Amino acid sequence: MQTVDYRHLAVAGVQALQPYQPGKPIDELERELGIKDSLKLASNENPLGSSPKAVQALQQALTTLAFYPDGSGYQLKAALAKHLPEHLGLQVQQFTLGNGSNDVLDMIARAYLGSGRAAVFSEYAFAVYPLATQAVGAELRIAEAEPAEHQYMPYGHNLANLLAKIDEHTRVVFIANPNNPTGTWLKRTELQDFMQRVPADVIVVIDEAYTEYVEEPDFPNALAYLDECPNLIVTRTFSKIYGLAGLRVGYAVSSPEIADMLNRVRQPFNVNSLALLAAQAALQDAAFVQQSVAINRAGLQQWMAACEANHWPFIPSVGNFITLDTQRNAAAVYEALLREGVIVRPIAGYGLPQHLRITIGTQTQNQRCISALQKVLQA
Ligand SMILES: *Cc1c(COP(=O)(O)O)cnc(C)c1O
């Protein structure tokens, strides 16, 4: 039989993909090292666990598993329209539900990108943007970020550079606010100005995965611009503040026209019935959200104090993670931390080979990681 290279047979965009590198699972580390009680601060998961209201809803939902989920996700969309905040007057037809918000990002690429088209995003932007773009054969246009020496937003997005990368082939701009893995963010005035300058035939995706954590007074809620900006898509997730990363549920809010296109490429039952019910219950759990914000605020302060005391340079963050400059090859630091039972996230794949991204945990978890880091960096 003829020998065929089945890698070579894949479409060019897929052959060029660098697979997404997730945080190392606790099970895997413990299996490899034969250790117990390790700590994962690698995937921006909620250290308080899941919304208790969501967990309660899940227990009741277990009796419904023989049925297909509601493919339209009507109840969750209606609950979101009411919740986000009601005065915005969002309509059910403006929502697209995803198997995590990554699924929605993929739908955006399939609906609006493809060969001959380009997506623009910043250096150090979230890894899923290039993956979704390349997989559909579209071109990547990467705008230079702010320099490490920038006064208040080192490694942050530079909107003028993003605008300069837009040309007649550009159909999508991806911006995470705040951005992962840098924790940097855009002010209301900056985002408004950007939206005014972007051509109307370019879709702007504002990825608000961490928005619930941000307490800066001039931080924008991009949902407020949907009325004026028909080219805007806002994405959000239940993976972070609601503590439901394992269930996979997120969503996009856009004009009804864009939502119509995204829903055409959506898999019929992409969000499972447990995820739909848990997400709807989690929305009602204001107490859990408040607690999560409070523990994150305290943890960010704890980390910043530790960084200053230990002279560890860091990127100022408004997310539920902090990115440190280890001032050496971070791969070795990452490995040494693993041997201490602490999993963090190396981000060499983002062009930051000296940095580590660390999820904000509980006070005790943070202290364990800080102590391990002191030990490893002094060794
Ligand atoms: C974590 C994260 C998401 C959420 O991904 P899910 O698929 O919803 O779990 C989206 N965007 C960014 C920038 C993230 O960091």
Image (tube, rainbow, N blue to C red):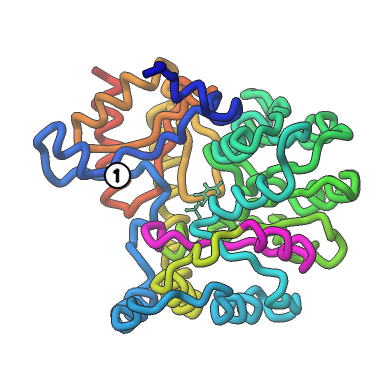
Image coords of residue 175 (percent x, y):
68, 44
* Vertical arrangement, residue 122 with respect to residue 113, above or below: above
Q: Residues within 10 Å of mark 1 (few under 14, many from 20)?
A: many
Going by the numbered disc 1, the residue's amino acid type is Lys
**Element at label 1:** strand
Q: Which residue is mark 1?
A: 40
Q: Is residue 39 left or right of residue 308?
A: left
Q: Which image quarter is the C terminus in?
A: top left
Q: Residue at horizontal 49%, vertical 59%? A: 99
* Vertical arrangement, residue 148 with respect to residue 209, above or below: above
Q: Residue at horizontal 43%, vertical 75%? A: 68
* Vertical arrangement, residue 113 with respect to residue 195, above or below: above
Q: Is residue 363 left or right of residue 107?
A: left
Query: Depth check: 223 or 1 in front?
Result: 1
Mark 1 C-beta closer than 8 Å to ligand 1: no
Q: Which quadrant of the view contains residue 303?
A: top left
* Residue lying at the far left of the rendered structure: 34
Query: Depth check: 327 or 356 in front?
Result: 356
Query: Depth check: 28 or 321 in front?
Result: 28
Residue 286 seen by the camera: no
Assess whether residue 246 is covered by the magenta stretch. yes
Image coords of residue 150 (percent x, y):
68, 28
Magenta extent: 244-265
Image coords of residue 198 (percent x, y):
87, 44
Q: Is residue 233 left or right of residue 33?
A: right
* Vertical arrangement, residue 80 with respect to residue 198, above or below: below
Q: Residue at horizontal 80%, vertical 62%? A: 225
Residue 162 seen by the camera: yes
Q: Is residue 2 left or right of residue 29?
A: right
Image coords of residue 235 (percent x, y):
63, 57
Assess whether residue 305 is covered by the magenta stretch. no
Q: Residue at horizontal 71%, vertical 46%? A: 186
